[in-house]
Image (cartoon, helix red, strand yellow):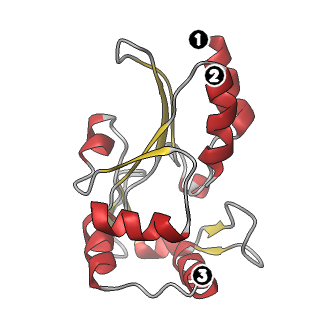
Amino acid sequence: MQLGTTQEKLKALGVETVAVVNTPLERARLYFKYRPARVLLAADPDAATHRAFRVPAIAFVEDGAATSWPLSATIGELQAVPINPTGELPAPQNIFAAMETLNRRDAFEPVEADQHIIAAHGGQLAGHFLVDRDGIVRWRHVEAAERISDLSKFPSDEEILGAARAL
């Protein structure tokens, strides 16, 4: 989890880091038992935090229907976007193939609870925010906010640290 190394640098600037996952608490605990995170984690299975911070969730529509990125897309549109966000894939793949490849590599087999999470939040995009002591958002980066081709592209350490230093 990239945010783990970033948070150490942010802490040196006096910034605390919290990551919110839209997963039920018990499922998050099980996942992070095997993939420990170095950041404070919060579980928000209803994605209320994502909505409060206006992080879009893609509504999937039928092929041929009109779409409006990032609010809606077809499965075909998503399949056309090759990703390799952390460089751990052998080559860029569409998001669905990438999930399968990484699940296989990690010997992760989705269970019914995971299917419920995907059904409820499969199109949820991610966001990064710097919030001041008064609760005011001072900087934000939302995954693929402008272009579908930016799926799985997140701000670098330098982008986040630069934003923190500028505040």
Nearer to us of marks 2 and 3 is: 3
Quick one: quadrant of the N terminus? bottom right
Percent across and percent down for residue 160 are 64, 31
Residue at point 30%, 70% (across, down): 117
- Residue that label 2 marks: 163
- Element type at marker 3? loop
Residue at point 34%, 85% (across, down): 111
Q: Earlier in the sequence, mark 2 or mark 3?
A: 3
Is residue 53 positioned above or below 116 on the image? above
Pointer 2: residues within 10 angstroms few (<14), some, or many (20+)? some
Q: CA distance from mark 2 to mark 3?
A: 34 Å
Percent across and percent down for residue 34 are 53, 71
- Element type at marker 1? loop
Badges 2 and 3: C-beta atoms under 8 Å apart?
no
- Element type at marker 2? helix
Marker disc for residue 106: 3
Q: CA distance from mark 1 to mark 2?
A: 7 Å
Q: CA distance from mark 3 to mark 1?
A: 39 Å
Residue at point 53%, 44% (across, down): 39
Q: Is residue 61 visible?
A: no
How many numbered callouts?
A: 3
Q: Amino acid at mark 2?
A: Ala
